[in-house]
Image (tube, rainbow, N blue to C red):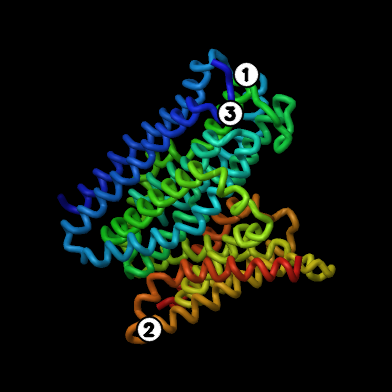
């Protein structure tokens, strides 16, 4: 069988693995939903959660499709499809593919045709490198979660502050990241302002939508405030990038 | 089934699913190798792995310890299989918990987080499948320079929107870590998109320390 990075056989192999992951998501959705109903949670609340999550996911998922397109130029479609549906993200997969290709004397972005051996080598490096979380969560996940639950049982107030602090710590790291090119502004390079202004636009839209949703008749806005703010920030990035570089 | 039994069943099922997916993922290159009668280039594999794995394994371990308490049980098993955690699964869970006004350490929070992450995973998978099927007509549109700036700024947009909600509600906790991260990311050129994953646990640990101090002093009520 002659090798091609877009061979139908590779689509079947990747598709089967993606199907298993899809089945896992459906399984956990059904399990959580049934449990929610069994413990008396409002079905409307569960539906609202699902609807908001689905709408919010659309824009980031399209960005993932763009990542598939980017990686497919070197690796064909099936492998990036699998890698970005299971565990991966663009930056991790690009670095792994670059390292694997470079180890065989190839240059990422300049590969015209891979042999089956090169393909299997790249797929192996990408797979083995990225799997820590998949097997580590089964090993230590229960202990970590029980630790947080017990903490809240011992001191409810501190438990709540602990959880909020974890969220704030994570968000503050990403807010810092938004400013990572900001120092260029002092040297007249304005491109570093773009992510900062995008962040401010999204924050402003979120604030306006949050305030508006408190008014009668506009409460539905609260469910879609995050996806709408996300889209507003992304849309603002287009003219901001054109103006500032 | 009480709450403990439910959590135990989530962990049992999660272990079975995740270890099965791990096995399937390992089998993918093996099956391709068998189909095409080839073995990996072992030298290339080792060199590639040595260049990649030490950083990824370290970051993977740090992410596991940092993100699992925020994602909940079901959400963690799913997120660490489907990936895109910081840019999708965690924000979707945070937003859902915030909207439902429940804590991740409660059973309701566990259920809400799992539903949000499962739906997000399903929608993502389906959109990627659609993208793969329509890749030829979609490429000129999605790969166009006109749209590139929008998709390059997803994280600033996302954390601007999420940040304003969480910081306004927890501003006493947020001031110090946000200032620290601003100073670090502006002053240290080495800190960029590739290192933000390592800075998350730094931010989390620092915030927990500040919060504990404020809590002991009675500032946080």
Circles 2 and 3 on the same chain: yes
Relative to the observer, which residue lies in front, B198 or A89?
Answer: A89
Q: In this view, does B38 lie above or below A209?
A: above
Circles 1 and 3 on the same chain: no
Q: Alpha carbon of mark 1 to alpha carbon of mark 3: how far?
A: 20 Å
User: Mark 2: few, some, or many residues within 10 Å (few <14, many ≥20)?
Assistant: few
The residue positioned farthest toward the right in the image shown = A187
Residue B10: assigned label: none
Q: Position of residue A179 (x, y in %)?
A: 68, 65
- For the point 18% across and 58% down, the residue is A37
In which chain is the residue bearing label 3? A
Give SS at disc 3. loop
Horizontal arrangement in the rendering, residue B184 relative to residue B220 (left or right): right
Horizontal arrangement in the rendering, residue A182 relative to residue B152 (left or right): right
Nearest to viewer (mark 2 / mark 3): 3
Which residue is under mark 2?
A214
- Disc 1 and disc 3 in contact, CB within 8 angstroms: no
Relative to the observer, which residue lies in front, A188 or B135?
Answer: B135
Which of the 4 image quadrants contains residue B203?
bottom right
- How many numbered discs, if any? 3
Horizontal arrangement in the rendering, residue A191 relative to residue A188 (left or right): left
Give SS at disc 2. loop
Q: Alpha carbon of mark 1 to alpha carbon of mark 2: how far?
A: 61 Å
Q: Alpha carbon of mark 2 to alpha carbon of mark 3: how far?
A: 53 Å
First in residue order: circle 2 vs circle 3: 3
Residue A5: assigned label: 3
- For the point 55% across and 36% down, the residue is A77
Circles 1 and 2 on the same chain: no
- For the point 66% across and 19% down, the residue is B43
In which chain is the residue bearing label 1? B
Which residue is under mark 1?
B42
User: Mark 3: few, some, or many residues within 10 Å (few <14, many ≥20)?
Assistant: many
């Amino acid at each position: 069988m002659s090798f091609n990075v877009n061979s139908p056989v590779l689509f079947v192999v990747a598709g089967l693995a993606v199907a298993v992951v899809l089945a896992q998501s459906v399984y956990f959705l059904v399990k959580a939903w049934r449990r929610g109903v069994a413990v008396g949670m409002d079905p409307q609340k569960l539906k609202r959660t699902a609807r908001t999550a689905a709408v919010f996911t659309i824009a980031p998922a399209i960005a993932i499709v763009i990542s598939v397109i980017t990686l497919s130029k070197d690796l064909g479609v099936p492998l990036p499809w699998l890698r970005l549906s299971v565990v991966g993200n663009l930056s991790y997969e690009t670095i792994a593919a670059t390292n694997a290709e470079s180890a065989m004397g190839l240059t990422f972005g300049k590969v015209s045709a891979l042999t089956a051996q090169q393909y299997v080598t790249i797929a192996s490096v990408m797979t083995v490198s990225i799997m820590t979380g998949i097997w580590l969560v089964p090993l230590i996940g229960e202990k970590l979660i029980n630790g947080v639950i017990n903490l809240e049982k011992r001191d409810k107030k501190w438990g709540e502050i602990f959880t909020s602090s974890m969220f704030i710590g994570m968000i503050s790291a990403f807010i810092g990241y938004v400013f990572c090119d900001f120092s260029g502004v002092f040297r007249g390079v304005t491109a570093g302002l773009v992510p900062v202004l995008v962040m401010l636009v999204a924050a402003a839209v979120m604030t306006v939508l949050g305030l508006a949703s408190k008014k009668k008749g506009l409460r539905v806005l609260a469910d879609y405030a995050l996806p709408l703010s996300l889209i507003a920030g992304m849309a603002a990035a287009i003219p901001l990038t054109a103006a500032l570089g | 089934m009480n709450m403990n039994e439910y959590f135990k069943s989530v962990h049992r099922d999660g272990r079975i699913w995740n270890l099965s997916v791990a096995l399937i993922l390992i089998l993918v290159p093996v099956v391709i190798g068998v189909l095409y009668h080839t073995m990996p280039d072992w030298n290339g594999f080792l060199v590639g792995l040595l260049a990649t794995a030490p950083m990824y394994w370290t970051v993977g371990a740090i992410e596991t310890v940092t993100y699992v308490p925020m994602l909940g049980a079901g959400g963690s098993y799913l997120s660490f299989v489907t990936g895109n955690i910081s840019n999708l699964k965690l924000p979707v869970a945070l937003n859902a918990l915030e909207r439902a006004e429940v804590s991740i350490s409660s059973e309701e929070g566990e259920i809400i987080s799992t539903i949000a992450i499962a739906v997000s995973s399903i929608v993502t998978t389906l959109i990627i499948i659609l993208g793969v099927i329509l890749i030829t007509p979609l490429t000129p549109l999605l790969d166009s320079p006109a749209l590139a700036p929008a998709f390059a700024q997803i994280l600033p947009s996302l954390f601007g929107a999420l940040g304003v909600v969480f910081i306004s509600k927890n501003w006493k906790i947020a001031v110090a870590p946000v200032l620290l991260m601003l100073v670090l990311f502006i002053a240290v050129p080495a800190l960029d998109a590739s290192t933000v994953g390592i800075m998350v646990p730094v931010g989390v640990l620092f915030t927990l320390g500040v919060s504990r101090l404020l809590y002991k002093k009675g500032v946080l009520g």
